[in-house]
Amino acid sequence: MPDFVDAPRVTRPDLDADLDALSLDQALLDVEIANARVADLTQRLLEAGEQIRALNDAVEAERAGHAASAARLAQVESSQAYRLALKAHSVRTMLRR
Amino acid sequence: MSQPASNAPARVLIGVLVYGGRHFVPRCVESAARVSAGSEAVVDTLVLDDCTPDEQFSAALGQQCAQLGVGYYRSPRNVGIPRNMNLALLESMASRYDYVVVANSDVVFPVNLADQLVATARTDATIGSITPWSNDVSIYRLLNEDPERNLSDPATVDWISSTFAAEFDTETFPIPTGVGYCLFIPTAVVRDVGLFDPVFGRGYCEEVDWCLRSHARGYRSVLAPGTFVYHMGSASTREAGVLQAAATTVWEHEHIVDLRYPRYRTEIDEFFARGPMEAARLRGLHRLLVQAARELGWSLELSELARPGEEFDVVRVVVSPEGDDPSAVAHWRGYSARLDTPDRATVLATLEALTGRAPEVVRVLETGAVTRSVLREAQTHEGRIEIVRSAPYPERV
């Protein structure tokens, strides 16, 4: 029987070759996993980007709607009819006191 | 006739991860070899040199390993800590070890490392990883004033570990995650959970990820207070350039952990809130100081202030001369523990009963009720007790 059988496994003559092989095999697996993760994260990034674009569009639409409403309100508040109604309301309030 | 498999000694592989460190690696390897020689388990050590740039150091380390019967492998390329650890796990499975230890090289192992941790692992099949206690083991540490000076000697490490083994035996505390400075893992668990994730690049947080992954598969991470390993702390990771000078972690890796395990930080907070570590520390240090006093001797100091001591081995017990604080505080090699002395009239007798021996010397630095009482006890003591009087001025006004 070879002498090294009674010696620790970790001092066997082909330790370097064995660990080189383990290291290489695992490195190849690690690369596969890393590539799969890149593909997965790229897909998620794209989906997140789409979602952000959709949300931005919705925000812009809301802003446009809000601006139109604000402009209409300003128009109403600057009309003669509104100013007369406001004055009448103040007089009524004063008389009630 | 061959022994039945159930009686066969456990086979343990210690994987020591190396990248430089000529000032601390050799003593780590020596200590691992002593574990092999002093264990009932069959213990082999494999030094995994992650392509240290200093080839002379690597050559010398290879020679040391050959002389000690320790395996040595130098990676042709630097692969980083997680992948280097994975080599230890892969070899442990390929060569059918029962357990694998992955450890930094800035540690000193106690001779009882393997036998203690194997016994601990065998208490519960759900244990996925065991982290031994240390002066520097993340949030579970036993802080020491000057660990390199006080604790790094192998005989001291052995003694502390055996003292803790006597106190805690195979007791364990569940912890949120193991610590990669020294992690003991059954190879059956490695087969189930997998390897360390190489996404953690050159290192840090890979053991957190692994342990949390193991928890998802029903395993537990535990701390074993009955085993003590000396850890220099961050030396091996700074040597490898994983940590910047002032950093204590790699924040990019912490963010990966936070993303994968949103409850992890909460679990840490809950662990602190439960507070098992403080009780364990008090218990461990009390046992350590009392045992040291029993074996090495002790001196009694009557003083309000804890002054730096001159003795290195003898335990210094400091007692308030007025008895304002009813307890005595023992100091030894950078560790302290309170010893109960409830009766001020019998402080000397109480401490003698606790330690099993009279003090080597009584130093009187200040007078007071307790000082007078101790001196009375010393006068009527069966054997002669040396009394030394010193003036504390100008330390106390």
Image (cartoon, rainbow, N blue to C red):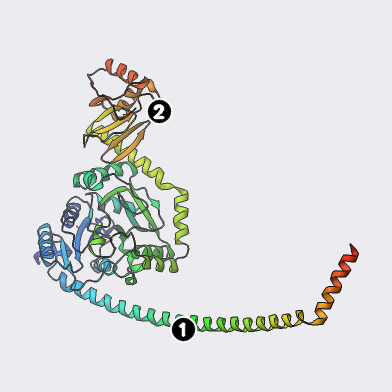
> From mark 2 to mark 1, how far is it between C-alphas?
68 Å
Question: Which residue is denoted by mark 2 in the rendering?
Answer: B326
Q: Dot 1, how many residues are within 10 Å of its Cα: few (below 14), some (14-19), or many (20+)?
A: few
Question: Residue drawn at (37%, 50%), measured in percent from left and top?
Answer: B172
- Tag 1, which secondary structure? helix
Residue B101 screen position, x and y as percent: 27, 59
Please tell me the numbered disc located at residue B60: none
Is residue B158 at all visible to an observer of this figure?
no
Residue B293 screen position, x and y as percent: 26, 33
Total numbered labels placed on residues in the image: 2
Q: Which quarter of the rendering shows the C terminus of chain B? A: top left
Residue A81 versus residue B377 in the image, above or below: below
Q: Quadrant of residue B32?
A: bottom left
Q: Nearer the viewer, residue A96 or B80?
A: A96
Q: Nearer the viewer, residue B148 or B277?
A: B148
- Tag 2, which secondary structure? loop
**Label 2: chain?**
B
Left-right relation of B221 to B75: right
The kind of residue on which mark 1 rests is Leu
Do residues under tags 2 and 1 come within 8 Å of each other at their CB atoms? no
Q: Quadrant of residue A39?
A: bottom left
Q: Quadrant of residue B187?
A: bottom left
Q: Nearer the viewer, residue B192 or B366?
A: B366
Is residue A21 at all visible to an observer of this figure?
yes
Residue A95 screen position, x and y as percent: 90, 66
Left-right relation of A59 to B373: right
Q: Dot 2, how many residues are within 10 Å of its Cα: few (below 14), some (14-19), or many (20+)?
A: some
Please tell me the numbered disc located at residue A46: 1
Residue B396 versus residue B10 in the image, above or below: above
Residue B167 versus residue B249 in the image, above or below: above
**Label 1: chain?**
A
